[in-house]
Amino acid sequence: MDTLDSRRATVRARIEALRQAMARNPALQVFVGAGYYDLATPFSATEYMMTHLGLPAELRPNVQMKYYEAGHMMYLHPPALKQMKADLDAFIDTTSRR
């Protein structure tokens, strides 16, 4: 049975796995795109988790958060899709040079 406690434990485990991966590989870059109107994964909850990873100060800049005037499926809103593409292009361009 899927309970709130089991879902919370799953989220904590995923966040811990990301923290460990970033600690093991300091070159790892993470891009997080969030829609302001996303009711499935609210941007504020995602933002909270990403800012509470427990990363050392030197690794915190490796997490980039971008926000879009859209819901869960940001790519269905043409202006958000255009901005997300530009943001991802910039992320890939920047991180591939490191």
Image: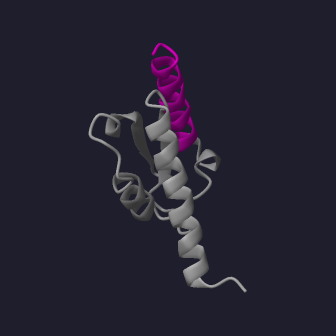
Q: Where is residue 60 in the image (x, y as percent from the top left)?
A: 33, 40
| Quarter the C terminus occupies | top left
Location of residue 23 in the rendering, given as x and y in whole percent from the top left corner = 44, 39
Residue found at the far right of this picture: 1
x%, y% of residue 43?
A: 44, 59
* Side (left or right) of 68 relative to 54: right
Looking at this rendering, what residue extends furthest in the front direction?
Answer: 24
* Residue drawn where x is 39% and y is 56% of the image: 47
Report whether 73 appears left or right of 50: right
Examine the image and state in which quarter residue 3 appears: bottom right
Residue 98's place in the image compared with 4, above or below, is: above
Compared to residue 28, the image places residue 5 above or below, namely below
Q: Which of 35 and 28 is in front in this view?
A: 28
Which residue is found at the position 29% from the left and 34% from the top?
58
Front residue of 93/39: it is: 93
> Which residue occupies 60% across, 78% down?
6
Assess whether residue 59 is covered by the magenta stretch.
no
Question: Left of 34 or right of it: where is 55?
Answer: left
Q: Residue furthest top?
A: 97
Q: Where is residue 96 in the image (x, y as percent from the top left)?
A: 52, 17
Quadrant of the rendered image containing residue 64? top left
Magenta-tinted stretch: 79-98
83 drawn magenta: yes
Residue 41 in sight in this render:
no
Q: Is the N terminus in the top left, top right, bottom left or bottom right quadrant? A: bottom right
